[in-house]
Amino acid sequence: MPSSPSSAEGLPAAREGRVVSGHGRRLLVEGEDGARVLCHTRGKKSDAVVGDRVRWQASGDEGVIEAILPRANLLYRQDEWKTKAFAANIDQLLVVVAAEPVFSESQLARALIAAAEAAIATRIVLNKRDLPAFAAARERLQPYAAMGVDVLELALKRDGAEAHACLAPLLAGQATLVLGPSGAGKSTLVNLMVADAKAQIGEISQALNTGRHTTTSTQWYWLDAARTSALIDSPGFQEFGLRHIAADRLAALMPDIGRHASECRFYNCTHRHEPGCGVLAALGRGEIAESRYRIYREIFEEL
């Protein structure tokens, strides 16, 4: 590690960098020069996540994180017991689903709601267009295409060169979080777009001294030598944390629901049972997909 600049008091001066991976309180931070250093957080709790810009100070061959710089946005995941942040400063979300296995529309909807709340643009990759089940999967995504979500129909494994040509300009200059259920083709996409993805995983694992376990955590990869385009790989298709969203904001974060909310008789309509509800009227006319309304009800009751 290069020698550290010193402050007026003779202590190492604070530097700025980006968290590119982490395991507990051990975080790998990349500096402006591209060099990476293992940093620790003060205290027992780590609030920094992949994508965070941080201020850190050298301590021997490692570093200590002093502060998290202001975030553009923050995404959460949740399980039955708790909600935890896992990625910050994301420009766009790329959700990979496939003709097979059948994807969970509820998980897809939650991802889009979380992105909308954080003002993050979203695209969907519908993979395995070469399979017979593709037409049914396309039909399930029709409500999303109709409300303006870009759906890219690809065959990542069969037509890798074509998929690369399609995705490369969409990822350029962006920090893109990619996720999807097991078997959908997310790993194929990461390996297609990141030339040395496996090598980078090995380097990160060695730096964090966590071996194969690091591959189950969120990773930040650069797609170009100039470090202007990034792909952030997060394991699985985790349940997005939505508990920080107020229930009365949910409709506005679901465009097909929200566009009819202004037609409601009551300003505080919950769109579940009130007379004169524009959303229920639109549902009755077939202008809102029943699956989408069912997801709205399910999440509203949770919130």
Image: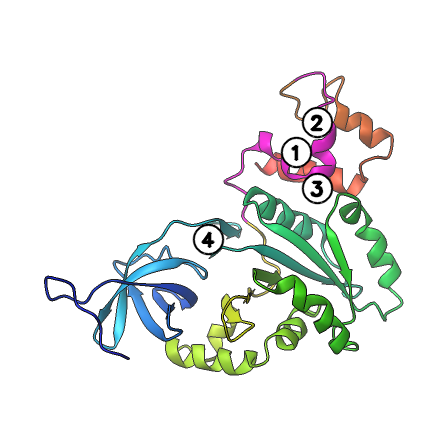
Position of the C terminus, as image quadrant, is top right
Q: Residue at x 59, y 80 (%)?
A: 195
Q: Amino acid at mark 4?
A: Ala
Q: Which mark is residue 85?
A: 4
Badge 1: few (under 14), some or many (20 or more) residues near its Cα, within 10 Å?
Answer: many
Q: Amino acid at mark 3?
A: Ile
Q: Residue at x 44, y 77 (%)?
A: 204
Q: Find disc 3 in the rendering and name its residue.
A: 295
The CA distance from mark 1 to mark 4 is 23 Å
Q: Find disc 2 in the rendering and name its residue.
A: 261
Residue 301 point in image, percent of width and height: 62, 35
Local SS, label 3: helix
Residue 66 point in image, percent of width and height: 26, 58
Q: In terms of sequence position, does the residue under pointer 3 or pointer 2 come before the other?
A: 2
The CA distance from mark 3 to mark 4 is 23 Å
Please say if the residues under marks 2 and 1 sit with CB atoms less than 8 Å apart: yes
Q: Amino acid at mark 2?
A: Ala
State which quadrant residue 250 falls in: top right
82 versus 10 height, above or below: above
